[in-house]
Amino acid sequence: MLPSDNKNMNMDKTLFDQATEAVLRRFAGRSSRRGILARLGGLAAAVPLFPLLPVSRASAASTSAKVKAPTPFAAKAQTKDETACDYWRYCAIDGNLCSTCGGGIHSCPPGTAPSPTSWIGSCYNPQDGNSYMIAYRDCCGQDSCNEVTCLNTDAEQPAYRPMANNDIIWCFGTGTSEMYNCSTAAVIGKAA
């Protein structure tokens, strides 16, 4: 390249080219390659965190009202008739319902005694959308009433986990006859 050609090239630069060159030369003089790479690395690390920032979303309010039932039993459970097997508290009950044998949902019929131990279950209440711990207690001392017998197995555990097994007759230790009559379902509290 001849010196005269270089002079012609400099003359051909537009104002935009000159301004861009001046800005880039000033930037290059004040920064290093390592500094730029560090900033790009910080930006690349921060970008995935942007979805975690709190943002008000209109769709979040509408979806939180519709909670999906956690189990097949909970999807069909009802809250009105405590004498039916699909009543929400009976998700893990196995036996006769005391509510149909002269007792209540959490009380034994006259002439029977509650077992001192119980098995537990966690049942979803479709009315308020919360899950509750339920203590299932056998009522003992009279022959089985056999009015309504239910076999629901939500979260049932094997016999080596007796606290959550509904196949065991819990009438031992009542001080009365160990004859099984019916089962109650008392709410202990909210499930975590």
Image: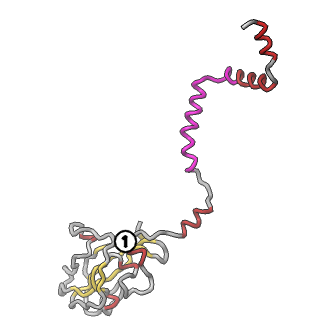
**Splitting the image into 4 quarters, where does residue 186 fall?**
bottom left
**Left or right of residue 4, residue 109 in this image:** left
Query: What stretch of residues is rendered in magenta?
Result: 27-52
| Amino acid under disc 1 | Ser
Badge count: 1
Give the residue pinned by disc 1: 122
Q: Decide: is 159 above or below 10.
A: below
The colour scheme used to paint the residues is secondary structure
Q: Decide: is 137 above or below 14.
A: below
Quadrant that contains the N terminus:
top right
The residue lying toward the viewer, choosing from 41 and 15, is: 15
**Left or right of residue 41, residue 103 in this image:** left
Q: Residue at x 19, y 79 (%)?
A: 172
Q: Residue at x 55, y 46 (%)?
A: 49
Q: Position of residue 96 (x, y in %)?
A: 28, 86
Q: Position of residue 61 (x, y in %)?
A: 59, 65
What is the secondary structure assignment of the residue under circle 1? strand
Q: Residue at x 37, y 88 (%)?
A: 83
The residue lying toward the viewer, choosing from 41 and 109, is: 41
**Splitting the image into 4 quarters, where does residue 8 fall?**
top right
Quadrant that contains the C terminus:
bottom left
Q: Magenta stretch mostly in which secondary structure?
A: helix
